Image (cartoon, helix red, strand yellow):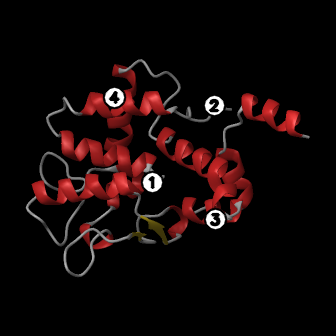
Amino acid sequence: MPHPARVLGVADVRRLIRRVRTHRHATRDHAMIMLSFRAGLRACEIAGLTWAMVLRPNGTIAPLLFIAGSIAKNGNARQLPTHADLKAALATLHKESGQPRAGPVIQSERGSHMTPRSIVNWFAAVYAALSLDGCSSHSGRRTFITQSARLIARTGGSLRDVQLLAGHRSLTTTERYIDGDSAAQRRLIRLL
């Protein structure tokens, strides 16, 4: 059975962001990282995302991302609150792209949608360049879900909220994404 994608810590995500600042398509690449780590999107969702799914009618970045069933796994459409870091990355990309109202958010060299395979390969290359072993295009998603699960109690929410953000049909699926933390387990036991 394959190992799940590695969950990244804050320092590794910062390294990833610093790395893509040197890329030819730095703004697009930064937006891809934010879509993965701040919205938990799958490669197919990043590839299929259109400006209509992220913009308000007035052309500004919406407070909610709409993940259409046509790009979501198993056709499960959902809405996600837009994280401030993601909103800033999308606004910069939107401006640099000429403020389009339609078309792909993440464009290939030719201006069309990148394929999900291209997204997977892009993440693999960046992780390899940083020697981040065990990482894949799913690392951002696993990191997003794990961080959300760890913080949900502070918000008054539950794991059901994390499940809905992830677009999972079953809470059992969401639980498989959550990485354990032995230090937190020790702190918990001391509190008992």
- Tell me if 79 is positioned left or right of 120 in this view: right
Task: Name the N-terminal-most of marks 2 and 1.
Answer: 2
Residue annotated with mark 1: 41
The quadrant where residue 3 appears: top right
Q: Is residue 4 shown above or below 157?
A: above
Q: What label sits on residue 126 in the rendered view?
A: 4
* Residue shown at the point (32%, 62%) measured from the top left: 49
* Residue shown at the point (42%, 18%) measured from the top left: 131
Mark 4 element type: helix
User: Disc 4 versus disc 1: distance between alpha carbons?
Assistant: 17 Å
Task: Name the N-terminal-most of marks 3 and 4.
Answer: 4
User: Disc 2 versus disc 4: distance between alpha carbons?
Assistant: 19 Å
* Residue shown at the point (19%, 74%) measured from the top left: 59
Residue annotated with mark 3: 161
Task: Name the N-terminal-most of marks 1 and 3.
Answer: 1
Image quarter of the N terminus: top right
The quadrant where residue 12 appears: top left
Mark 1 element type: loop
Mark 3 element type: helix
Q: State the residue lying farthest toward the right.
A: 192
Task: Name the N-terminal-most of marks 4 and 1.
Answer: 1
